[in-house]
Amino acid sequence: METGQRTAAERYTGPLTEEGLEAIFGGSDDWVSRNVRTAGGPEALLMYIEGLCDGDSIAEQVLRPLTEPERMGMFAAPGPAEEAILSGRVYSCAVKRRRELGEAASDLLDGSCLLIFPGTGSALSFQVKSKDKRPVGEPRDEKVLKGARDAFVEPIRVNTGLVRRRLKNPDLRIVETDMGSRAGTKAAVVYIEGFTSPALVDELKRRVENIRTEGIITSAALEENIADRLSSPFPTLISTERPDKFCLNILEGRVGILADGLPMGYLAPGTFAQFFKAPEDSANHFIVGSILTVLRYLALLISLLLPAFYVSVATYHHEMLPTKLMMTIIQARQSVPFPTGFEALAMLTAFELLQEAGLRLPQSVGQTVSIIGALVVGDAAVSAKMLSPEIVIVVALAGISGYTMPNQDMGNALRICRFLLVICAAAAGMFGLAIGCGLLIYHLCSLESCGVPYMTPLSGGGDRLSAFIRRPSPEAPLAEPALKTQGDGSRRTENADSGRMES
Amino acid sequence: MKKALSALLAVFVALSAGGCSPVNIWADYRETEDLELIRVLGVDSADQSVTVTAGTGEWADGEESRIIMQRAENLPAALNCLRCDPVGREPCFTHTEYLVVGEELAREGLGGLLDYVERMSTLRLKTGLFIVRGGSAESAISACAGERSSAADMLKYISANVELMGLGSVYSCGSVAASLADDGLALVQAVAVGGSGGTEGDFILKPLGYAAFRDGKLLCYFEGAEAAALSVLTGRVKSMGMSAEPEDGSRAVMELRGFHVRVSPRWEEAGLAAVRVDIEAKAGLTQMSGGADIEAKAVRRALERRLAGQLEELTERTIVRTQALGCDFAGLGGMLDRRCPGKFASVRVDWASIYPNLDITVSARVELDRTFEITSTPASAVYGDERGNVDAVR
């Protein structure tokens, strides 16, 4: 037996034996191995992992038919008994014969039970997965007023079903592979054959297959193994918990990735403009959707630049402030002991602390913490002249604007950049801010997601306006030019037509 | 990383090449609470020295605006002396809205003052410029300082309303400097220290037409109707009050607005022979006394003719005065230049000598477009006679 960064099927080679399986799983308390006598006489060994398999299914679909004389009574030898079971004497919906140790181990880990007739050198694998899983519910983070209410759940098979239900297209491909040697997590690459760029599909398949970690238990593990550049805080994979958004992006020519155990779908390539599109945009009237998108870009500017701009004008460029506002700020800061830059950084840090506290605590307590933090502590700090009210307003405005980001990963990246820009502004005023913004734009322009420039279509490679406005559905080209889809890229391509979404 | 560093280097080089050295950037660092906003700055000259009077902004919690005064041998030195303010705040001139100049300094010349404003980034070119007629800037600013008033507030009020009253217009330091550099002539809003400010409506600073400058030095003042005529010709008036008598015994008070001035030159072989100035204005009736029926066409036409006549007369009088001074304060040369730049190019250099002897005629047309007459029935019939008896009147 070999060990290393590979899946169970790859790690355990050789013929299937009872001793081999005992050696692999025997040390675990949830490992069940028991003798079963069939109605015909031959003894068999039933093996499964408790918790992964459904006990009722084993009893009803495997054990019960084995003990019925009218079904199995005439098979006294192991060989004929095995053949009879394979031909349908045992009414489990899925049964396979396994001869390799690795295959058998993989099936056991996937929720199957094995029935081994001694001396045959093979095992019968019945799929009796445990049914204790979370039902498909409403999205938690991507709620919409108008639109579908279902969300991805942890089991990959349920998620592929949700996708299939929307994309009733025979060209839809769901290619599964195992990731991680120890966890053996299944991942599925989803795309439309003949429509999605083959180069993009191949690239994503290559990246998924090349993942060599112990296991994909968290979403970050998947993202970090697929993302183009790890050093950037900006997300290059679109993550969504909404099957409708996932399918819409598949129809636009993106490639989707689903991972077992993660109630999220991932889409590549993820460009900057994509992170400003909310699921609700496509549900609203196109004018409303466009205005909301523009509003989100405005919120981006406020969230990113407002604290830095305030620090800059309040310390270096006083002439940029209106006289009355300047007088108000002077009045408010008369007794504040800290410099403006430090005050802004401290307030931003306090804001982040409050946010983290609100997220980690139970919902009811989290709200209380937010209220106490924002209102009581904030008001007390202003009253005690430790902070000026202006900085509270500025940081609160920036924070609220940050919450308008439809994608939390993008929001997190902006939070980091906000801090850095405040430091730049505190160091050199508007010049520092300009340098910071220049470097940020440089960084964003240098990013790529699966070969597509991150700033597409803002930097070219498509209709620039499409980043800000949503065209009416009949006029909008479905596929983005940068995704290099096959066909003419128009909305009514053959493949896209047949895969129209059902909501 | 290398790319990021090279980008950073490129930004530094670009900023440095643009004149932004790090030393200059960090020299501008000030915390707002350490600043004393100077909203109005007065400059006077006396005995070979310059006196600056700075009026600070008032605070929200009732702290009054303060007046700081310093004297030094020149303006930069005097402004530097303001930093010795005992309160300990650094004067900040970036929000100085008004620059007030005493008459004595105005007579000596505005050149040095405007030169300083142009060169220094701390004072803005759009700062409004005022001349104190017959007084000093220090007296004007000090007179305004009170419990609920300051020179900045009064000058702000004047700036906002002077064009509505037809009493002049506030020019910025930048535009005055540009005008002086262009033809050596400039108009500056003049104010005078008037009432005590103790009673309602009694303003301490009063707008008093224009102070006219030639070659940077105060030449004369245009006030009252002359200032209004100059405002009409220079297009810096929003409305102007004027009264006329359409019929015997009746009197109408009108508000003129919507002025439109057009110059029509007559060119001959020798050059520019004459200029006709056409003024058009709309008028609205604001008050009518006497028995004239304003709805009658004849009465309206008579009123329009009288208003036009008055407008012509005062405009002609003002132009004649500027011709006598030899200075085109009305900016007719500029208007001609814009109207026919090709032909005017031949006289542009000699315009100063041509203007005093030029045949200029003025033609005005006033249209009474709004009488605000609610009904043709006399007001007494609607609201009743002195005893309130409506039917009796009808």
Image: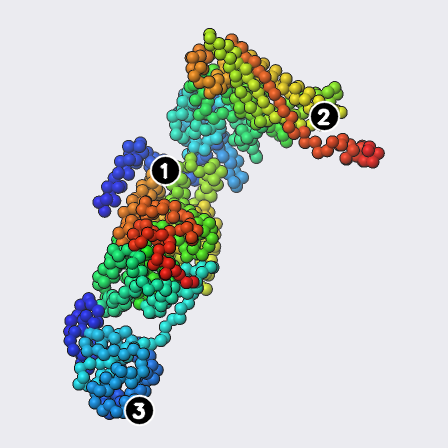
Query: Mark 2 is on which residue type?
Result: Ala
Query: Mark 3 is on which residue type?
Result: Glu
Q: Chain of mark 2?
A: B
Where is residue A293? Give x, y as percent: 42, 50
- Disc 1/disc 3 C-alpha distance (Å): 95 Å
Q: Quadrant of residue A485?
A: bottom left
Disc 1 element: loop
Q: In the rendering, which numbered label is found on residue A70?
A: 3
Which residue is the site of mark 1? Answer: B29
Q: Quadrant of residue A80?
A: bottom left
Q: Chain of mark 1?
A: B
Q: Does B297 sit above or below residue A15?
A: above
Which residue is the site of mark 2? Answer: B296
Q: Is residue B391 or residue A94 the one in the foreground?
A: A94
Where is residue A428? Give x, y as percent: 33, 40
The residue at 37%/58% (across/down) is A497
Query: Mark 1 is on which residue type?
Result: Tyr
N-terminal-most mark, 2 or 1 = 1
- Disc 2/disc 3 C-alpha distance (Å): 121 Å
Q: Is residue A56 visible?
A: yes
